Amino acid sequence: RVSMVTHAARAFSSAVAVPGVSSSSSPSGTRASPASFRAKRAMASSGKSTSTAAGAAVSQNADNARCDTVVLDGANLAWTFSASLYAKEGMKCRTRLPLSRGLTLALEAEVWAEMGVKPIAFMPASYVEGPLHGLADGGSLRTLVPCNVEYQGKGLWRNVVLWELTEKGSLVTVKRPPGQRDADDKQIIAYARSINAMICSNDRFSDHIAGAGASSSVLGTANGGGSKDLRRWLQSNRSGYEFSVGNPEDAAFKAGKPKVARPPVGSAHLPAPPVGEGEAPPPSSSGGGDEAQTNVGWRAETHAPGSSRPWAVGVDRWGRDQNTGRKGRGKRRWKTRGDPGGTRAEKKYDPNSESGSETDDPEFPFWALSDEDLPVNFKLKK
């Protein structure tokens, strides 16, 4: 069943230069049956069988076809997981980059089996393979997760976790041509509408609804209906979700570990780059920090050039500009009683303190913690 869904998604993906579906979409005025998805979700949450819901909506048009597939918005999941981690750990976790674990958590969620649907994900191709600055779990030579990324040569990087998902058929990659950063969104909507699949995304696709004209074949509204038709379909077939991030210290205690171990992060933990790609820098006597990363030959101008994200131009963490020290976007600081300055004092990290936790370090790489060290639950919104 999974392979059939995968082949259909890949065939759909390769059949169109600009993501879309044929003009044989649902006629104007048709509306997706709420039983196709919402009844399944309600039954799954109550523990009841979904067999009735699975066969409740069968009709001649795609909008009322049986709902047996869920299409995951991979980019939205990767960024939402990163934002959830920041919301949980606050200013202690300032790195902003898409994280593959958001997608893997959604793909492995038990809720899909309870609902009787098979998941398949769509994600921009550059998140899986491309320059480091746009790669999931990448960002820069300082922030990359070494167990998840591999250098392919000539400035090309690969996220091995997502690459394996594409090989298994669980993930379909979508190329984003210049000026079409929403290409993956369009393909998600078009493919889901073509088979009346459920969409799992926190993106409400408002811009696509507003731009869905009466003849918008790209979004599957070719025979009329336009924005209203797409809005009604998304209201019935799209669901939001959330990540519940646990406490690393609690996880370490349950596992019998004395403390949370700092995970490896950065190019210092990668094998040396291919010989001949850039000149090796002179040896450094200071050791540690950025010098330890350049000692093995990794150089940003050679192996991670270019920029389309803030972290590649001197901003590695939430709200901090490394070049000027100027504060950027950050959490609003509310006035607290007894604080004449009107702000909460940040707890300073003392590496020599026996009572302090290493996770209090502002540079602690929470985004690189393993599944065992950072428990996270994925669930659909009601």
Image (cartoon, rainbow, N blue to C red):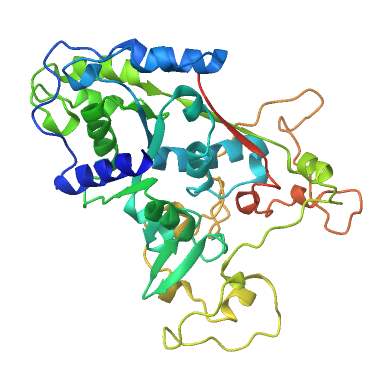
70, above or below 269, in the image: above
Q: Is residue 382 visible?
A: no
Q: Position of residue 198 (x, y in %)?
A: 35, 26
The residue depicted at 21 percent of the width and 52 percent of the height is 178
Spot occupied by residue 108 in the image (x, y as percentages of width and height): 52, 39
> In the image shown, does 331 or 379 lie closer to the viewer?
379
For this view, does 51 lie left or right of residue 180? Answer: right
Q: How many numbered discs sit on the rendered protein?
A: 0
Q: Is residue 357 left or right of residue 342?
A: right
The answer to whether any part of residue 115 appears in the image is: yes
Image quadrant where one finds the N terminus: top left
Residue at the spot x=54%, y=80% of the render? 272
Q: Most extreme residue toward the right, as rendered?
A: 354
Depth check, front residue: 36 or 90:
36
Asked where in the image residue 223 lies, by quadrant, the reply is top left
**Up/down of 271 relative to 116, above or below:** below
The spot of residue 177 in percent (x, y) is: 21, 52
Among the 4 quarters of the image, the one containing residue 3: top left
* Residue at (26, 47) in percent of width and height: 10
User: Is residue 278 positioned above or below 139 on the image?
Assistant: below
Say left or right for 312 vs 68. right
Question: Could you tell me which residue is drawn at 69 percent across and 73 percent down?
Answer: 288
Instruction: Give how far across and how far down residue 339 sits, in percent.
Output: 78, 29
